[in-house]
Image (tube, rainbow, N blue to C red):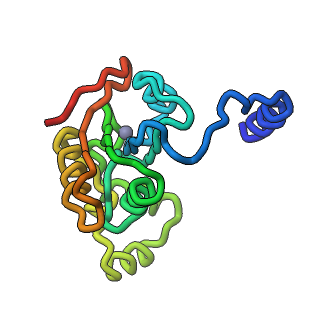
Amino acid sequence: MLEEILEFNRKFVENKGYEKYITNKYPDKKIAILSCMDTRLTELLPAALGIHNGDVKIIKNAGAVISHPFGSVIRSLLVAIIELGVEEVMVIAHSDCGACHMESEEIIARMKERGIKPEAIDMIRYCGVDFDSWLGGFDDPESSVRNTVKTIKTHPLIPKDIKVHGFIIDSLTGELTKVV
Ligand code: ZN
């Protein structure tokens, strides 16, 4: 699989496949999108929103969540807003998300099957990592989006003039539904 990708890449550059993607680092639409890493959304999300290279900043993780108020998502949003001119944020979760109903205890059990030592888990727990909130999923994507929107809107380092909106995208049709 990796060889295939590397071979494609050599040809892509050789044939100047990049020419139609040339742009700069500033998002033309002044929008940042926080969404899920789900593979169904890789091309569907930008296509369904009419987004092209250079239009928006896209931040992705499992579930489109903010798992820590000073973690990498807020860091990325801050850079997008303060340094790159983003004025609006869209939080876009999706139907049938793998992070929905995720159980931290199940994940930990599978880690142990993969050779992670129970002592390591205990030690990390002892150091203050709350596995339930860090690895756990959400029951309802709409309330997850609502929480994420609220976290961004009320964050002490995010300027108050930034508009934040929540949506669910249909993983099959790409239809966006606003979360109010
Ligand atoms: Zn997902």
In the rendering, at what x and y percent does residue 57 appear?
46, 44
On screen, residue 142 versus residue 109, left or right, reads left
Looking at the image, residue 72 lies above or below residue 85: below
Residues 40 and 74: in front is 74
Residue 109 visible in the snapshot = no
Residue found at the very far top of the displayed protein: 173
Compare residues 2 and 112 and report the one nearer the observer.
2
Give the residue at x 33% y 76%: 125
Horizontally, residue 58 falls left or right of residue 163, namely right
**In the image, what residue occupies the spot 41% across and 42% down?**
30
Position above or below: 154 against 7: below
In the picture, which quadrant includes the N terminus? top right
Number of numbered discs visible in the structure rendering: 0
The image quarter in which residue 16 lies = top right
What residue sits 39% from the left and 41% below the top? 31
Q: Seen in the image, is 72 located left or right of residue 137?
A: right
Asked if residue 146 can be seen in this view, the reply is yes
Question: Residue 82: x percent and y percent?
Answer: 41, 59
Name, please, the residue furthest toward the right. 14
Q: Quadrant of ligand 1?
A: top left
94 vs 110: above or below: above
Tell which of 136 and 38 is nearer to you.
Answer: 38
Residue 32 placement: quadrant: top left
Question: At which x and y percent is residue 127?
Answer: 35, 82
- Residue 49: x and y in percent read 40, 25
* Quarter of the picture holding the C terminus: top left
Which residue appears farthest toward the left when viewing the image? 180
